[in-house]
Amino acid sequence: MSIEDLRKHLTRLEAQIIHLRRVLVHAERQRIAVQEQLQKVATFPVVSLPVEITIQIFTHCLPTIKELLKSSRHSDLRDPPLVFLGVCRRWRDIALGTPALWSTLQMRFDAIPLQVISEPGVVEGFVDRWLGRAKNRPLSLVLHTDKYEGEDYFDFGIERVRDIIRRHAPRIESLDLYSSRTEMRKLALDSVAFPLLQRVVVCDVDGWLGDDSADPVDVFSNAPLLTRVHLFENTTYSSFVFPALQLTEFEGRLDDLEFFNLAPNLITAKCMVDFVPEPPSVVTHAHLQSLTLAKDESDPSDPMDILPHLILPKLETLDVSDIKDMDPASISGLVQRSAAKLDTLCITVPNDLYFSRWLGCLGVLNDTLEHLSVHSPSSSFLSLLTILGDPRYERAGPALPHLKALSISHAGEIHFGDLVECLTRRSPRLESFSIRFKAGTFLHDEIYHEGSRTEIVSILSTLAEEGMDIHIGSGGRKEPYVQLIRS
């Protein structure tokens, strides 16, 4: 092709491009016009829902307190309820007119940019407008004041946080506070009246790195309805002075057992105990009904067994599943010493070190135990569970005749023939049974010792139809398991 021909071809291509651009512009204008017309005449079912249903949908979209705590940022335009304001005028009006959407607020005062902090009243105005939309509803606040390590973030000022808390204190029902002990002292929470406050979560972000020589911080003495306290991570009870007499629920780290004397009305306690000095005498608590000895997630070591130092006559629920080498004699000793009627027990039995003692312990609980949860059972203990009370076996152990729920997690191989016989024998008293395996699933042939899968599934299905709630599957201790059979 000659030079002249190439130039003519290029000219034709350029003309085509210009034409196509005009066509595209025309098509885009037509599209916009059609969209505008559609907006005028179309109906969107989600927008035309009754207000009551829309409010319910909005409410279910709200994050829980636990979900808020997992977030590293405060609420913004990407989160409900703020996201509802930008969809359409109707949704905006519904959201702004629904107080329940605005009664919970998380604020990371440690992660506010300098340009926002430097504007007087901007943050305070945002908080006041948000909580003002809640009208007269009780408030739930999650506040972080610990330092954020970032170049564009600066100290908001603990005095400003204190003023915000004081301004809204009459309506606060739940308060989660993440700050250093030094800054909490500056908040002067003991001098603030909290007439509605019922639940408190406190996290000393300095934890063990803080000043142990400092006096404990007095908090919430003017909160007459406060009954639930949760100390997060490395925060110890002795670092603060709570109105202990009115507490009924506690979760946190203890460094001595005097706490049980200070909180005589406690009903539920979940305690992280690494080490406590032995008290001069056994501590008696007349009202505690539920006790959990838990380990700190950041510390792999087992919690300390404090049961030998306690007398708990009202104890009904005991969870010591975080203690891998729990001596069952400690449990039976507590129950016998306290004359307690324990009906719920959660344990871990990874080996046969105390096998005979477990038989003795279950014997002590034989007349009262209704709910048993076993984690990582040894093969011997797992076999024992399937034959308890079976008259065909000598020394089969206590029958546990009142057992209503049996849960086994992180289990190894099991004799399914014995299992279905056990469940059949305990029906209809046994209302719930679940087992999660270390690996594989219920449908894996390798876990069967005898009997066909069809026979076993048929028996389990019959039990489920008769009312027993049955779950069989696999997964770790905190992972969901596969639900295979359920009535």
Image (cartoon, helix red, strand yellow):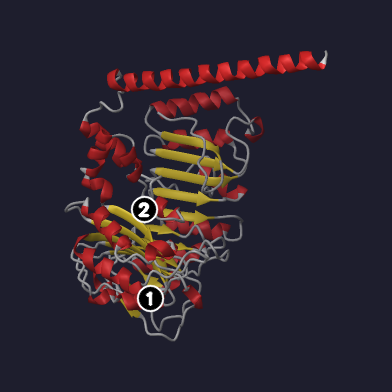
Left or right of residue 320: residue 50: left
Whether residues under marks 1 and 2 lie with C-beta atoms below 8 angstroms apart, the answer is no
Quadrant assignment, res 57? top left
- Residue at (52% x, 16% y) in the render: 23
Q: Is residue 467 above or below residue 333?
A: above
Along the viewing direction, whichever of 82 and 190 lies nearer the viewer: 82
Callout 2 amino acid: Ile
The location of residue 108, given as percent across then percent down, is 40, 61
Q: Is residue 282 above or below residue 427?
A: below
Left or right of residue 349: residue 331: left
At mark 1, the secondary structure is helix
The location of residue 157, given as percent across then percent down, is 37, 72
Query: To which residue does mark 1 refer?
Result: 183
Q: Nearer the viewer, mark 1 or mark 2?
A: 1
* Quadrant the N terminus occupies: top right
Residue 24 visible? The answer is yes
Which residue sits furthest right? 2
- Residue at (22% x, 50% y) in the render: 133
At mark 2, the secondary structure is helix
- Residue at (20% x, 60% y) in the render: 171
Q: Total label count?
A: 2
Callout 1 amino acid: Glu
Quadrant assignment, res 340? bottom left
Where residue 65 is drawn, which disc sits there? Answer: 2
Along the viewing direction, whichever of 174 and 51 lies nearer the viewer: 51
Where residue 401 is drawn, which disc sits there? Answer: none
First reached walking from the N terminus: tag 1 or tag 2: 2
Residue 265 visible? The answer is no
